[in-house]
Amino acid sequence: MQLNRLKHTDSGLFFLLAGPCVIEGEEMALRIAERIVEITDRLQIPYIFKGSYRKANRSRVDSFTGIGDEKALKILRKVGETFDIPTVTDIHDAREAEMAAPYVDVLQIPAFLCRQTDLLVAAARTGKMVNIKKGQFLSPQAMQFAVQKVVDAGNRQVAVTERGTTFGYQDLIVDYRGIPQMQQFGFPVIVDVTHSLQQPNQTQGVTGGLPQLIETIARAAVAVGADGLFMETHPEPAKAKSDGANMLPLDRLEGLLARLVEIRKTINRFGA
C-alpha cells in the first residue's frame, strides 16, 4: 500500500480506517469488514480495516484486553486476505513491532506513546506504514518530531492522526487548525472521529463518550481537507468489549459516508 494512493485518491476523496475497537472474534471481524468493503467500494473510498489485537491502555485492570495476541493477529491477516484490503493495528512497545508486522499493513502508535523513540524506530524498521496518533498533550506542530523519528529510521511511509486534545480532566476538543498545520510535514493527516469524542477518566472507571456528535466532527474534518478519517464501528456498540460509548453503529455508517462524500465533492469543486 502506497501513501500516494491514500493522499491522492482517484476520486479526490478521503480514505477510511474503520472497524471495531478490538478484535472480539473472527466472525465479528469478517462481518464488519464485509459490510464496510461493500459501502466503500460503492462510494469509491479507499479502505483500511482497523482492529486492535490487544488493548493495553484500559481504565481498570478488569477491563477486556483481547482474545490473545496470536489469535487476534491471525484474524487480522484473514480479514486482509479475504477482502484484499490493508489492515491496521496498534502496537504498544518496541518488541511488538516485529511480532505484529507480518500480519498487518499498517502499525499504529497510540496517542499516549507518540513520543516513545524506541517504539517509533522499531515500527519504522519493519518497513510497514506507521500511523502516529497525536498525543492529547501535544500541539500539532510538535508532532513533526515524532514523524522525523520514523523518517530518520529510513521509513517515509508515515501518517499522522488527530484525535483530540485534553480539555480539562474529562473531555477532549479538536483544534481543526492542526490539520493543515500537520499536512505541512508532507504526509497524510487523518482525523480520528470517534476517539475525539471520548470523555476519559470517568469516576466509575469506564470511559464515556459523545457519539451523537460523530457526524459533526466528521463533517468538519472533511470540510477542512483531512486526507483520511478514522472511525470505530460495531453492529451493537452497547455490547462492544471496548470503547462502546463512542462508537458508530455499523448500520449508520453508509449514510454518514455518503453525506461526507458529497461534502468533499462540493469542497473540491470550489478548490478549497
Image: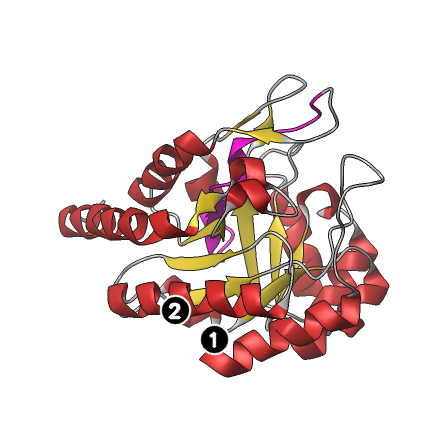
The three-letter code of the residue at mark 2 reads: Val
Q: Which residue is at 26% across, 61% downward? A: 12
Kind of element beneath mark 2: helix
Q: Is residue 229 visible?
A: yes
Mark 2 near mark 1, Cβ–Cβ under 8 Å? yes
Indicate the position of residue 258 as horizontal and vertical percent values.
25, 52
The magenta region covers: 182-202
Which is closer to the viewer, label 2 or label 1? 2
Kind of element beneath mark 1: loop
Question: Relative to residue 196, is residue 9 drawn left or right?
Answer: left
Label 2 vs label 1: CA separation? Answer: 8 Å
Q: Which residue is mark 1?
A: 85
Q: Residues within 10 Å of mark 2 (few under 14, many from 20)?
A: many
Seen from the viewer's position, the closer of residues 227 and 86 is: 86
Q: Is residue 157 visible?
A: no
Based on the picture, tell me whether residue 257 belongs to the magenta stretch: no
Q: Image height check: is 39 above or below 77? A: above
Based on the picture, tell me whether residue 196 belongs to the magenta stretch: yes
Question: Relative to residue 118, is residue 164 drawn left or right?
Answer: left
Tell me where residue 170 sits by quadrant.
top right
Question: Relative to residue 95, is residue 157 drawn left or right?
Answer: left
Q: Quadrant of the C terminus?
A: top left
2 or 1: tag closer to the N-terminus: 2
Q: Which residue is mark 2?
A: 37
Q: Image height check: is 91 above or below 264? A: below
Q: Which residue is at 64% across, 17% downward? A: 168
Image mark count: 2
Indicate the position of residue 42 as horizontal and vertical percent values.
26, 68
Q: Which residue is at 29% across, 41% downward? A: 223
The three-letter code of the residue at mark 1 reads: Ile
